[in-house]
Amino acid sequence: MSIRDWIHQREIEGLATFTYNDVASAFPDLAPQALLNNLYRARKAGLVTQPFRGFYVIVPPHYAAKGVIPPVYYIDQLMAYLEKPYYIGLLSAAEMLGAAHQRPQYFCVMTTLPQLHAQKQTSLDWTYRATINDALLQTRNSETGTVRFSGPELTALDLVQYEHRIGGLSRAATIIEELSEQTNWSGAAENGLIAQATLATVQRLGYILEHVLQNQEQADALYAELRQVASKFNRFPLSPRKSTVGAEVDKRWSILVNTEIEIDEL
């Protein structure tokens, strides 16, 4: 059996991915360079793609014509291969929650440190955090199993905390407005949600809910939860990348209002 035949047989068996070690085990008599040469030819022929070093995805017929496999097709298997916890986050999570009015250019994957030595020229956009709280995630069936993505509240917090990765606070606020029909801040202190973000992030989100989105009910709910973990707020700028000289202070959220946030028309 050739490596091409082996790949085809795996596809018949319903296996969507494989690793270099899988091939090496199946062809123990082939030298490592010969294995790599065969895999390279399989890639050039469009039979497989390699989103990460040592990890291969068999290109199914319905994606062959497009030439691109959406990462949601293989992300769960890839993260199992890497032995890293993960969730689909930021704009990619917002899209899964029905709150992104335009498709993101990159597929955001949240995982834990240390950083991965990722391949170049891939649609995967890696973002790192210290810990991942599984209770704040949702799951959905995919073509090859299930995937994990941030729930609406964690997505909203991430959009503010990592706003520099999505195009700024105005874009974050626009998506948070779309998410607001799904977000519920009750229990955010007890279930560990607030602990997943910096206090500066929560204060910024509270300011956005109250003064930008005019959502007093959700702002009050978040404020009550935040007061359970912080009796006194430190003062933070609304935008950490802009000067605070002359900025007015929002006393409730202890935010230095040093930028203007505008909601996009949907």
Image (tube, rainbow, N blue to C red):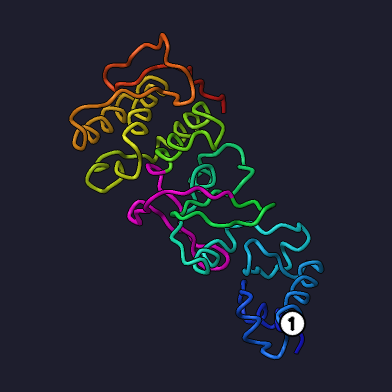
What is the x, y in percent for residue 174? 50, 29
The answer to which of 92 and 198 lies nearer the viewer is 198
What is the x, y in percent for residue 192? 27, 47
Question: Residue at the location (73% across, 75% down)?
Answer: 36
Question: Residue at the location (51% across, 63% down)?
Answer: 79
The verdict on residue 35 being magenta is no
What is the x, y in percent for residue 90? 50, 43
Task: Tell me: 213 left or right of 88.
Answer: left
* Residue 199 quadrant: top left
Number of numbered discs: 1
Task: Tell me: 72 left or right of 187.
Answer: right
Read off the magenta span: 125-154
Image position of 108 with respect to 208: above or below: below
Image position of 218 with respect to 19: above or below: above
User: Dot 1: within a 10 Å radius of its alpha carbon, few (fewer than 14), some, or many (20 or more) residues?
Assistant: some
> In the image, what residue type sits under mark 1?
Ile
Task: Tell me: 136 left or right of 84.
Answer: left
The quarter in which the N terminus is drawn is bottom right
The verdict on residue 141 being magenta is yes
The quarter in which the C terminus is drawn is top right
Residue identifier under label 1: 3
What is the x, y in percent for residue 179? 44, 37
